[in-house]
Amino acid sequence: MMSAKPVSISFRPVAALLLIWATALATPGCSDGTTTARQRTVRVTGKVTYKNQPVEGARVAFLGDGKSVPAFGLTAGDGTFALTTYDAGDGAAPGEHVVTVSKQVAQASAKTPPPNETMEQAATRAAETVADPKSLSLLPENYADPAKSGLQFTVTDKGPNDFQIELKD
């Protein structure tokens, strides 16, 4: 009959492996920083007007210099906006920004209703109304193109960063 020998386990190699594993998990991987690093932002607000009237529902974009993350905002009924980069209202990265402003609606092609149209006929006509694939710009189209907008603003650390954007024909 064989006798069993006690097995001795050293915890040093196990502890060393756990330390290596923990270090590997805690060490950041290789990255160019574009997807994980959040850029610092500062509050940016403003107002968009066209023909001396506030523009509601316009999309405002501060596009940065190509190295910063763009910031976006949507104008309220009084034409005011607050930009968002990561979290609502957090602003934009400091620096030079090419700015675009756009407001578009889908065009619908509808048939003119005949006189004495019944409800069933109206429902059929409404179902046949389709959205035109080309949207209609409610503002001069050059403002939607970064190369043609002519809008450029500098966002500063110290502020105030409240920009009045007057659009013209």
Image (cartoon, rainbow, N blue to C red):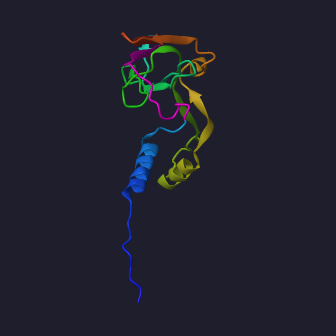
Q: As rendered, which of 69 and 22 lies closer to the eye?
A: 22
User: Which quadrant of the rendered structure holds the N terminus?
Assistant: bottom left
Please tell me how many numbered marks the rendered image carries.
0
Above or below residue 15? Residue 146 is: above
* Residue with the most extreme bottom position: 1
Above or below residue 126? Residue 53 is: above
Residue 147 in percent (x, y) is at 63, 17
Residue 143 in percent (x, y) is at 57, 18
Residue drawn at the location 58% of the way across and 29% of the way down: 136
User: Which quadrant of the rendered structure holds the C terminus?
Assistant: top right
Q: As rendered, which of 159 and 168 lies closer to the eye?
A: 159
Residue 122 falls within the magenta-colored stretch: no
Residue drawn at the location 63% of the way across and 38% of the way down: 133
Q: Let me know if residue 167 appears in the view.
A: no
Q: Let me know if residue 103 appears in the view.
A: yes
Residue 55 in percent (x, y) is at 44, 20
Q: As rendered, which of 17 and 13 lies closer to the eye?
A: 13
Q: Specify whether 157 is left or right of 66.
A: left
Q: Magenta segment range?
A: 31-50
For the stretch drawn in magenta, the main secondary structure is loop
Residue 151 in percent (x, y) is at 54, 12
Q: As rendered, which of 155 and 135 lies closer to the eye?
A: 155
Q: Specify whether 72 is left or right of 8.
A: right
